[in-house]
Image: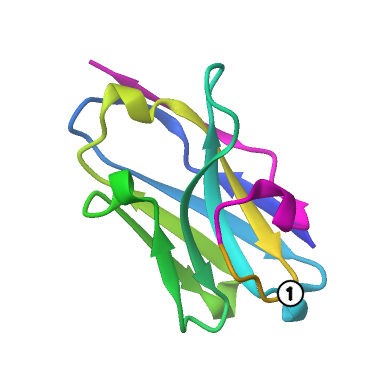
Amino acid sequence: VQLQASGGGTVQAGGSLRLSCEASGRTYGMHHISWFRQTPKIEREFVAGITWSGSSLYYEDSMKGRFTISKDNAKNTLYLQMNDLKAEDTALYYCAVAMTWMAGWVTPSQYNYWGQGTLVTVSS
């Protein structure tokens, strides 16, 4: 599976961005697909995830209410709508795929494939 993330950029605090992650290759085997983010101070932090079937969603508590994860199966694309952005949301955002069912969502090592990251910068 290959993952191509896009949509990052620079936005003022309070603004919005929508990230996209297009999957290609052996996509029929995807199970969990999630967003993580990374800063110089924080290793990859789970943001939000969804099962490819759409039956389950999970958000990191601090993202609830501001971020919305969604997908378009026909386009093999995952999205992350980010609203009311804060300076602390500045990070490199990655999408990741797990090819098997997982009991949890947040551990990076459980994911099999990663995109290249897209940079989000929020200015205050």
Label 1 amino acid? Thr
What range of the chain is rendered magenta? Answer: 105-124
Residue 33 position in % (x across, y down):
59, 64
Given residues 78 and 30, the one toward you in this image is: 30
Tell whether position 1 is magenta.
no
Image coordinates of residue 54 in percent, x first then y, are 48, 81
Give the image quarter of residue 69: bottom left
x then y, percent, for residue 22: 62, 59
Where the N terminus falls, by quadrant?
Answer: bottom right
Give the left or right position of residue 43, taking residue 98 as reference. Answer: left
The structure residue drawn at horizontal position 78% and vertical position 58%, both measured from the top left corner, is 112
For residue 17, above or below residue 24: above
| Residue in view at x 26 percent, y 28 percent | 86
The answer to whether 18 is drawn above or below residue 124 in the figure is below
Measured along the vertical axis of the image, is residue 90 above or below residue 8? above
Where disc 1 sits, the SS reads loop
119 sits left or right of 123 in the view: right
